[in-house]
């Protein structure tokens, strides 16, 4: 069972289309296990029909500002080599690769942004 504290310490933000209330983007943050100074960006997604509208940047900027406002020292995330657009977004926002891990068929990249 998930504790109430786990819910209280996690943060999910969504963007909805104003005319239909359709969910078109989201970002999720969760404290990093074993390091209370770091928060993990667990997911970021924009509906395919709404990509290239700047929503990913808006979501990521909001996540960064939220983490900073909560007093975290860093944000970490894990992504794959097959997601070059996402990787460029992270790099444009100051994230740097701190670990590369080959797995079958892919390379996992761990990124970190010091706040």
Image: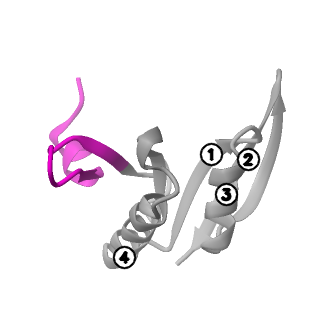
* Cβ atoms under marks 2 and 3 closer than 8 Å: yes
Residue located at (45% from left, 60% from top): 53
Instruction: State the separation of the CA atoms marked 1 and 3.
Output: 6 Å
Magenta part of the protein: which range?
1-26
* Cβ atoms under marks 2 and 1 closer than 8 Å: yes
Tell me the tag on residue 109: 2
Quick one: SS at disc 4? Answer: loop
* Cβ atoms under marks 4 and 2 closer than 8 Å: no
Earlier residue among tags 4 and 3: 4
Instruction: State the separation of the CA atoms marked 1 and 4.
Output: 21 Å
Earlier residue among tags 1 and 3: 1
| Crowd around label 3: few <14 · some 14–19 · many ≥20 (10 Å) | many
* Cβ atoms under marks 1 and 3 closer than 8 Å: yes
Earlier residue among tags 4 and 2: 4
| Crowd around label 4: few <14 · some 14–19 · many ≥20 (10 Å) | some
Q: Which label sits in the foreground, 4 or 3? A: 3
Instruction: State the separation of the CA atoms marked 2 and 3.
Output: 6 Å
The residue carrying mark 4 is: 71
């Amino acid at each position: 069972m998930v504790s109430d504290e786990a819910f209280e310490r996690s943060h999910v933000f969504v963007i909805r289309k104003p005319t239909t209330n359709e969910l078109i983007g989201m970002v999720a943050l969760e404290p990093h296990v074993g390091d209370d100074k770091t928060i993990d960006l667990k997911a970021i997604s924009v509906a395919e029909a709404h990509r290239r509208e700047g929503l990913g940047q808006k979501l990521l900027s909001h996540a960064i500002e939220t983490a900073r406002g909560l007093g975290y020292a860093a944000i970490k995330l894990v992504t794959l080599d097959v997601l070059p657009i996402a990787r460029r977004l992270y790099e444009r926002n100051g994230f740097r690769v701190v670990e590369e891990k080959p797995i079958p068929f892919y390379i996992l990249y761990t990124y970190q942004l010091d706040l």
